[in-house]
Image (cartoon, helix red, strand yellow):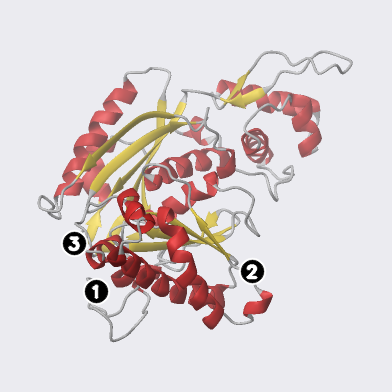
Amino acid sequence: MPSISGAFGSEGRTAASTSSIRHSNLALVANEVFSVGGGLTRADIAVRTGLTRATVSRLVSELISLRILAEAELLDDGRPGRPGTPLYPASGTIVSVGTEVNVDRVAGCALDLTGSTVDSFAVTISPDEFTPALPLEILKRELAVMLTRLSEDEEQRVMSIHVAVPGVVNAASNTVAYAPNLCWDDVNLNTELNDVVAGIPLSADNDAKLQAVSAHAQLGTDMQRPGTFFYISGDIGIGGAILNSGEAMQGAHGWAGEIGHTTIDPRGPQCHCGARGCLEKYAGQREILSRAKLPLGTSPEQLKTLLEEENPDALEAVERAGWALGIAIANTVNLLDIEDAVLGTALAPIVPWLLPPITEQLNMRTLARSARDIGIHPAANIDFPASRGGALRGLSSLLQSPTMLIDSL
């Protein structure tokens, strides 16, 4: 069964001593169980949190009644006394939905608290059928069908819906301020999806930020500061996100991390955003495939095969992309003092070919390079990471405030 333990953690949490003690301690206990993927007993939680066994037992009973935790069979560990009962994330009870729209696809998935996918959809959009209205039309249709399917299981409850968009998103109002590849300006998703979500809390965010949430849950511990890295997505365009201790930095307007439209060459090719020489015009999937003389829609695996065969056009296109990425990553390292970068979606499979030109630029442009060990990592190969990241964010929000289940009844 897949785990979502990487998306949650108990770092920095201590037992609360204010008037919100019950709320805080419910979150504390829930996160202890989820941070290790389950298997802790009530006694284990008491030791880890400093709470009394009586308090832990009371909190666990409430989390079980809320269907956040579930009990497994008694665990006889050989210690004196009554065997402990392992606790795990509940399966098939609470569900969070993540969706994503892009020029070439609309997708979505529903995850339960174990991280298992309980439902999903994916629709491909060919270049010749794309219109600005089409992705939203598909999203409305497919999301409505998914929610209907989920509602047929009386044991499941959908707690949240997240929409990932490749553009500048005002998360406070769920408004897509600007998505150049989709040709969207000031699209309010609350208005567009109101009839579909039917009162379920809706959130929208930049797709790279939600991909980074998914990447964080999948990454190992080979990074210098796990949970703190710069993420770069490689879809039709280029997106980015800055994660600090597992949390995506937002900035004043929620737009932090938009590396795709940083300048590589002010006299470079014209970008959809109106500027010249943006990173997207060198390392976006559209540009790499065009430079490699391949049709849009060529998969990353097909491109990887050509690179393995040393196809000269493919090698030149990827080297150019790596050169531009190296400049952008070096600027980010100098500005933010980040030690790891994670390349996702279409960039991940071709990291071995991107790495030499990236490293060359890092060596040339990074301040105090000899004192820095900068890691470049491919993200895990999973389908539709922005959708999964959105669903994970919804589940994480629930664990930070389990009483929202009571408040929403």
Please say if 250 is above or below 29. below
Foreground residue among 230 and 169? 230
- CB atoms of marks 1 and 3 within 8 Å: no
Residue 171 visible within the image: no
Q: Earlier in the sequence, mark 1 or mark 3?
A: 3
Q: What element carries label 2?
A: loop
Cα separation, mark 1 vs mark 2, equals 33 Å
Q: Place residue 244 in its image quadrant.
A: bottom right
Give the residue at x 35% y 63%: 238
Horizontal relation, residue 287 to residue 98: left or right: left
Amino acid of disc 2:
Asp
Residue that label 1 marks? 271
Residue 40, by quadrant, is top right
Which numbered mark, 2 or 3, is in the foreground of this view? Answer: 2
Q: Name the residue under label 2.
A: 373
Q: What residue type is labelled 1?
A: Cys
Picture disc at residue 183: 3
Amino acid type of the residue tagged 3 in the rendering: Cys
